[in-house]
């Protein structure tokens, strides 16, 4: 009887230790970061893009993009786009429906910046864009 009790106790002990080790080694699921640094980016990654640029350099802009700009390098890249000018723009970013690309410098290809999908930041940038868009002056890009 003592041997049977010993074996049952041993088996139960091994099972309990196994369960404890399994729970101890389980990794907690990590949440993906809401923001990340980038050196290479593409505006096509953003749905329904809207650009707010203190300075707009050389960049390929999709035709469905709204552009709010203070200064720009070449008005040829703005042809066929919905463009307004506003002198009080401070900052450079590209926003979409669910994400934003905030740039460290002018809006130009491969400028350092960071992506964010943090809802509050995206909403605030959209609000800022819409406020300045309403006050902006339409730019005439006709060539004569």
Image (cartoon, rainbow, N blue to C red):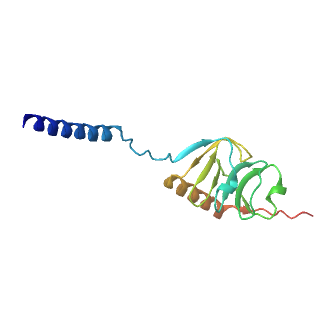
Residue 36 position in % (x across, y down)? 57, 43
Query: In which quadrant of the rendered image does the C terminus lie?
Result: bottom right
Percent position of residue 42, x then y: 70, 51
Q: Is residue 59 above or below residue 39?
A: below
- In this figure, what is the number of numbered marks? 0
Q: Residue furthest left?
A: 1
Judge whether 8 appears above or below 121 on screen.
Answer: above
* Residue 136 falls in image quadrant: bottom right
Residue at the image point whose x is 45% and y is 47% from the top: 31
Residue shown at the point (49%, 54%) measured from the top left: 120
Q: Nearer the viewer, residue 67 or 70?
A: 67
- Residue 143, placed above or below residue 18: below
> Looking at the rendering, in which quadrant would you find the N terminus?
top left
Looking at the image, is 102 positioned above or below residue 124? above
- From the top left corner, tell me how far across and down residue 80 is, in percent: 80, 65
Please report the residue visible at 72 percent of the width from the left and 65 percent of the height from the top.
64
Q: Position of residue 13 (x, y in %)?
A: 20, 37
* Image-based side of 72 in relation to 129, left or right: right
| Nearer-the-camera pick, 22 or 79 | 22
């Amino acid at each position: 009887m003592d041997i049977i009790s010993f074996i049952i106790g041993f088996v139960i002990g091994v099972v309990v230790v196994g369960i404890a080790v399994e729970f101890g080694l389980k990794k907690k699921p990590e949440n993906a970061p809401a923001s990340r640094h980038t050196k290479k980016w593409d505006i096509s990654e953003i749905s329904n893009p809207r650009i707010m640029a203190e300075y707009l350099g050389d960049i390929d802009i999709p035709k469905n993009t709204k552009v709010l700009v203070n200064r720009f390098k070449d008005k040829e890249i703005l042809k066929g786009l919905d463009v307004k000018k506003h002198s009080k723009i401070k900052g450079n970013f590209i926003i979409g429906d669910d994400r934003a690309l905030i740039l460290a410098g002018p809006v130009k290809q491969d400028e350092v910046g960071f992506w964010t999908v943090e809802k509050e930041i995206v909403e605030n940038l959209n609000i800022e864009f819409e406020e300045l868009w309403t006050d902006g002056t339409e730019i005439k890009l006709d060539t004569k």
